Image (cartoon, rainbow, N blue to C red):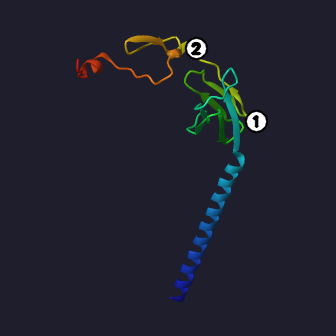
């Protein structure tokens, strides 16, 4: 009886030591991943040198990303120097750039003028897309005729 009690205690202690070693190994692995990552900051500007707010900055091939602030500044953490950042915004040509060994990456986005020449009908008149400063919604003929009017 005493022999079984002793064996069960030894087995328990061995299992406990093995569990602790696995936890320690897992923490060392996660720390090594953190050491390899680095923070990249920068500014996204238009051709005139003005910061562009709301630009999407994403790491290519991942779901990790951020957006620029009011002045066009951003900050993102990448896992390696081989990471590639993709910069995109409505009205601008999407651009991608490799991080390499840089910790500061400033980007200039070019205007996407091909989208600005489309004509949009607004109310009773028509305007070019580039002249509209507010939000625009598309309403089909079926939705328009389905709405009751007083006149």
Q: Residue at x 37, y 12 (%)?
A: 124
Please tell me in which quadrant of the rendered image residue 137 appears: top left
Camera-near label (1 vs 2) is 2
Question: What whole-number distance in Å separates the C-alpha atoms at marks 1 and 2?
Answer: 31 Å
Kindly identify which numbered label has been placed on residue 39: none
Q: Earlier in the sequence, mark 1 or mark 2?
A: 1
**Which residue has dot 1 on it?**
102
Label 2 crowding class (10 Å Cα cut-off): few <14, some 14-19, many 20+? few
In front of the other: 126 or 65: 126
Q: Residue at x 60, y 31 (%)?
A: 53
In front of the other: 100 or 111: 111
| In the image: residue 1, left or right of residue 96 | left
**Which residue has dot 2 on it?**
113
Residue 30 horizontal/vertical position (percent):
65, 54
Residue 25 horizontal/vertical position (percent):
65, 60
Q: Residue at x 43, y 11 (%)?
A: 126
Please tell me in which quadrant of the rendered image residue 13 appears: bottom right
In front of the other: 122 or 119: 122
């Amino acid at each position: 009886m005493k022999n079984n009690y002793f064996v069960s205690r030894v087995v328990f202690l061995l299992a406990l030591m093995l569990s602790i070693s696995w936890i320690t190994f897992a923490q060392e692995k996660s720390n090594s991943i953190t050491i390899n990552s680095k923070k990249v900051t920068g500014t996204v500007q238009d051709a005139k040198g003005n910061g562009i707010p709301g630009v999407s900055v994403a790491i290519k091939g991942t779901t990790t990303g951020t957006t620029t602030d009011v002045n066009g500044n951003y900050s993102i953490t990448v896992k390696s120097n081989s990471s590639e950042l993709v910069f995109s915004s409505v009205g601008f040509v999407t651009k991608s750039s490799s991080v390499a060994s840089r910790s500061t990456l400033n980007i200039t986005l070019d205007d996407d003028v091909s989208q600005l020449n489309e004509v949009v009908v607004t109310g009773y008149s028509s305007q070019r897309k580039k002249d509209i400063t507010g939000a625009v919604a598309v309403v089909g003929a079926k939705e328009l005729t389905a709405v009751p009017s007083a006149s």
